[in-house]
């Protein structure tokens, strides 16, 4: 595949993105270091990383280990830990003290279903629990494309900072149109004791006798972005709204979404543009998700952005334990990562920023060499101000978890 060779060319290479006006001067992002922290081997796919930072400063990353980007036979969920802001990582499924983690690696619903998890997402619940959510995938006979149904969303919970994980349990959903369940592996934020998360809902209009519940099936090109919430630390979830005033089933192809709070009651959502290299969409709520504006295309500057995860600059500081900022949403600067779909068949790991609450965005900073598959990941910040992106890079059937350290500079310094 040559992915290791080409990505090696990116190591320690400084790449400068275009300049933008900033309240304190011009912003410059520079790639400082690229490393493989879970290298591929024996045709294995490691991908779809998600990050949290504990109160004690320990970084916790989860990802899927399988045979393929979406077909995922033999898939299982794994975790890794870092005690120095990602400078070094303990071996997979091993705590910082060298002891094996209990309960992971494992597949979602191992005794309930013969199928395997597509991807995980890790929540840090209001009560301090770590909650990993994973989709239990079901692939119908002859269904070779990533149009998947699923056997529900499942969670495993740790109450001791990730050392032990309980048995997977199926998530209960309330109020989802058409019945069934949503998807809890997109993006989220906390508001007091409430977790808000974006989700994909399938086309419940296609529910027919003899078929799976339509809200548990992602029909080709038929999903809507939705907002869900949990008030019991991620155990059960309630439908809030569709993040699209027009409910346009035919617009996106696959409603992967990134969400961030950018005001007292203002939310912004970036929606995947489709299965190829389409521009993403953006919608906004000014009443904490009760109603939404019409989804509009983001300007062509941003190019094709998929599986966005977005944060205000202050929120990154807050989540990363760099600085305690109770009202982190009072910030107009956003940082986002995800897939930069370069062509219909090639991708890169991208990093974007906005200085006007998401109205306009920078061009993507490509963090690696263009390849077949890359980009589902997350971002946090070190105390020295560097951004740390964890993602994956490789091919559909073989990929590594990689880490990208990106420096931020303005006219006033780092």
Image: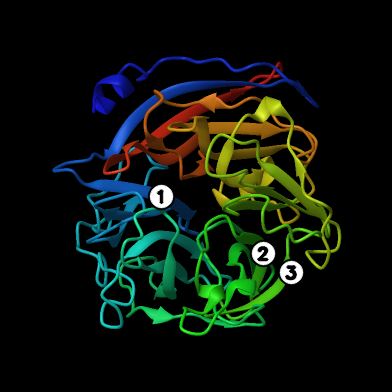
Mark 3 → mark 1, Cα distance in angstroms? 26 Å
| Residue 301 appears in the figure | yes
Q: Position of residue 55 (x, y in %)?
A: 50, 59
Instruction: Read off the residue under disc 1.
Output: 48
Q: Which element type, helix, strand or loop, lies under badge 2? A: strand
The front one of 168 and 1 is 1
Residues at badges 2 and 1 in contact (C-beta under 8 Å)?
no
Tell me the quadrant of the picture where the C terminus can be found: top right
| Residue 57 appears in the figure | no
The front one of 394 and 218 is 218
Identify the residue shown where x is 45% and y is 69%: 131
Q: Which of marks 3 and 2 precedes in the sequence?
A: 2
Q: Position of residue 204 (x, y in %)?
A: 62, 73
Quarter location, residue 133 = bottom left
Q: Which element type, helix, strand or loop, lies under badge 1? A: strand
Q: Position of residue 395 (x, y in %)?
A: 31, 37
**Residue 241 marker:** 3
- In the rendered image, the vertical position of residue 193 relative to residue 382, given as above or below: below
Q: Which of marks 1 and 3 precedes in the sequence?
A: 1
Tell me the quadrant of the picture where the N terminus can be found: top left
Say whether residue 63 is left or right of residue 252: left
Instruction: Read off the residue under disc 2.
Output: 226
Q: How crowded is mark 3: few (under 14 residues within 10 Å), some or many (20 or more)?
A: many
Q: Which element type, helix, strand or loop, lies under badge 3? A: strand
Identify the residue shown where x is 65% and y is 61%: 224
- In the rendered image, the vertical position of residue 106 relative to residue 379, given as above or below: below
**Number of numbered discs present?**
3
The front one of 83 and 282 is 282
Q: Residues within 10 Å of mark 2 (few under 14, many from 20)?
A: many
Q: How crowded is mark 1: few (under 14 residues within 10 Å), some or many (20 or more)?
A: many
Residues at badges 2 and 3 in contact (C-beta under 8 Å)?
yes
């Amino acid at each position: 595949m040559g992915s290791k060779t080409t990505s090696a060319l990116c190591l320690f290479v400084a790449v400068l993105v275009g300049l933008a006006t900033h309240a304190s001067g011009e912003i410059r992002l520079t790639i400082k270091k690229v490393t493989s922290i879970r290298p591929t081997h024996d045709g294995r796919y490691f991908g779809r990383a998600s990050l949290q930072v504990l109160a004690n400063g320990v970084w916790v990353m989860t990802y899927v280990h399988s045979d393929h980007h979406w077909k995922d036979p033999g898939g299982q969920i794994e975790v890794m830990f870092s005690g120095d802001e990602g400078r070094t990582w303990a071996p997979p499924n091993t705590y910082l003290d060298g002891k094996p983690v209990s309960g992971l690696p494992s597949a979602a619903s191992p005794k309930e279903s013969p199928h395997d998890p597509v991807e995980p997402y890790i929540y840090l619940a209001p009560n301090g629990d770590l909650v990993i959510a994973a989709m239990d995938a079901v692939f119908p006979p002859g269904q070779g494309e990533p149009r998947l149904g699923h056997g529900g969303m499942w969670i495993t919970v740790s109450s001791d900072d990730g050392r032990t994980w309980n048995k997977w349990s199926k998530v209960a959903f309330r109020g989802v149109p058409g019945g069934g369940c949503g998807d809890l592996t997109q993006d989220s934020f906390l508001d007091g004791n409430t977790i808000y998360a974006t989700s994909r809902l399938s086309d419940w209009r296609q529910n027919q006798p003899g078929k799976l519940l339509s809200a548990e099936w992602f029909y080709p090109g038929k999903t809507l972005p939705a907002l869900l919430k949990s008030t019991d630390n991620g155990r059960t979830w309630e439908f809030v709204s569709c993040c699209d005033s027009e409910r346009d089933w035919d617009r996106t192809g696959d409603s992967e979404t990134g969400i961030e709070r950018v005001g007292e009651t203002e939310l912004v959502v970036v929606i995947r543009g489709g299965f190829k290299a389409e521009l993403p969409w953006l919608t906004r709520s000014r009443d904490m998700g009760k109603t939404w504006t019409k989804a509009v295309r983001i300007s062509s500057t941003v190019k094709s952005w998929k599986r966005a995860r977005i944060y205000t600059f202050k929120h990154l500081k807050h989540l990363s334990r760099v600085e305690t900022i109770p009202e982190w949403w009072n910030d107009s600067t956003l940082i986002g990562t995800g897939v930069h779909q370069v062509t219909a068949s090639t991708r890169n790991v991208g990093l974007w920023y906005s200085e006007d609450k998401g109205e306009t965005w920078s061009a993507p900073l490509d963090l690696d060499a263009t390849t077949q598959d890359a980009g589902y990941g997350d971002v946090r910040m070190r105390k020295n101000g560097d951004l740390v992106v964890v993602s994956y890079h490789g091919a559909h059937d073989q990929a590594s978890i990689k880490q990208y350290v990106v420096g931020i500079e303005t006219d006033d310094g780092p």
